[in-house]
Image (cartoon, rainbow, N blue to C red):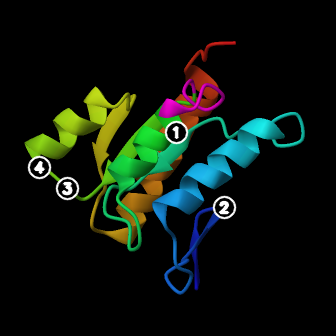
Amino acid sequence: MAHECGSGTFSSTRNRPVELSNVRWRVKQTSRYRQDIELPAVVMLDLKLPKVDGLQVLEVLQGDPHTQKLPIVILTSSDEQTDKLKSYGLGANSYVRKPIDFADFCEAVAQLGIYWTMLNEPLE
């Protein structure tokens, strides 16, 4: 199922099982063939994913030398202090509570996108 949000589309992958080993494999494949695959300017990661823990995904991304410099924004509904501490401890660059209202969510994503792709100066 896809949802329109401004000029972007968000897809749901709930019907497809995801395991942490698959996430590690995909990161390694991306690293192995990184010349052929353009990495994103920023990763917006939810902690409450349906099939795998977002903190585990963060750990995998930060553990790979080819993806560890990617800016990672935690965009989640969690207000738990332990989630914030773990996220920053694992190398997240930002922690944002996502708005409940879909229009506000779209605006927040747009603003984050502007900051991370136009204003932030990434490592080369």
CB within 8 Å, label 1 to label 3: no
Q: CA distance from mark 4 to mark 3?
A: 6 Å
Q: CA distance from mark 1 to mark 4?
A: 22 Å
Whichever of labels 1 and 4 marks the residue nearer the N terminus, that label is 1
Whichever of labels 3 and 2 marks the residue nearer the N terminus, that label is 2
Whichever of labels 4 and 2 marks the residue nearer the N terminus, that label is 2
Q: Which residue is mark 1?
A: 61
CB within 8 Å, label 1 to label 4: no
Q: CA distance from mark 1 to mark 2?
A: 27 Å
Image: 123 above or below 116 = above
Q: Nearer the viewer, mark 4 or mark 2?
A: 4
Whichever of labels 1 and 2 marks the residue nearer the N terminus, that label is 2
Helix, strand or loop for the magenta stretch, by majority: loop
Residue drawn at 30 percent across, 43 percent down: 96
In the figure, residue 84 lies in which quadrant? Answer: top left
Q: Quadrant of the C terminus?
A: top right
Question: Percent x, y for residue 82?
Answer: 12, 42
- What kind of residue is marked 2? Ser
Mark 4 surroundings: few (<14), some (14-19) or many (≥20) residues within 10 A: few
Question: Percent x, y for residue 95?
Answer: 30, 38
Q: Which residue is mark 3?
A: 78
Give the magenta part as a residue range. Answer: 63-69
Mark 1 surroundings: few (<14), some (14-19) or many (≥20) residues within 10 A: many
Image: 79 above or below 32 = below
- What kind of residue is marked 4? Glu
Q: Which residue is mark 2?
A: 7
Q: Which residue is mark 4?
A: 80
